[in-house]
Image (spheres, grey):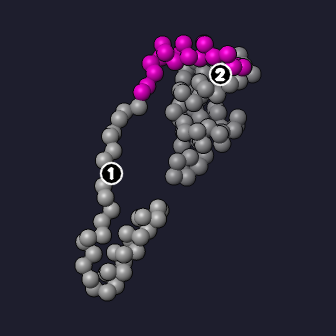
Amino acid sequence: MTFFRFVVFGMRAACKLRGLPYDQFKLPSIPHKKKLPVVLNSKEMRALVEAMPFPLKDCLVLMLFMDTGLRLNELRNLKVADIDLERRVIHVHQGKRSKDQSDSIWQRFPERVCQIL
């Protein structure tokens, strides 16, 4: 909570306790533009992966990140045991809002893993 918000809420609480009007203590609304994210198509993704000068292990991590849409923290906490190549599923433990979830993997992803490992 920011200090400004803390002060506004504090003033409103103090006015409520004393039975005073508190309508003048409002948080200003800040307009936000809702933009859709830029998404790469499959051709652009393939060109990006093929143009990477990184080791194959780094390419694998990037492919996993792009393919599954995992959040950075979820990808960071991912373990090898969480990837089921036979079923093409990734198990994410304690992801967003501390929930467990499963994400599907691209069909060619297991082939790439076998090439790298």
Left or right of 47, for residue 35: left
Type of amino acid under label 2: Cys
Q: Quadrant of residue 13?
A: bottom left
Q: Position of residue 108 (x, y in %)?
A: 58, 18
Q: What is the residue that sits farthest to the right in this orientation?
A: 117
Alpha-carbon neighbours of circle 2 within 10 Å: few (<14), some, or many (≥20)? some
Residue sitting at x 32%, y 80% = 15
Residue sitting at x 38%, y 71% = 9
Gap in angstroms between the C-alphas marked 1 and 2: 40 Å
- Which element type, helix, strand or loop, lies under badge 1? loop
* 100 vs 24, nearest the viewer: 24
Type of amino acid under label 1: Ile
Residue sitting at x 60%, y 12% = 50
Vertical side of 78 occupied by 18: above or below: below
Q: Position of residue 22 (x, y in %)?
A: 27, 75
Magenta part of the protein: which range? 38-56
Q: Earlier in the sequence, mark 1 or mark 2?
A: 1
User: Can you say which quadrant of the picture contains the C terminus?
Assistant: top right
- Residue 92 lies in magenta, yes or no? no
Q: Determine which residue is flagged by label 1.
A: 30
* 65 vs 1, nearest the viewer: 1
Alpha-carbon neighbours of circle 1 within 10 Å: few (<14), some, or many (≥20)? few
Q: Determine which residue is flagged by label 2.
A: 59
- Residue 111 in view in this figure: no
Q: Position of residue 57 (x, y in %)?
A: 71, 24
Q: Nearer the viewer, mark 1 or mark 2?
A: 1
Q: Quadrant of residue 41?
A: top left
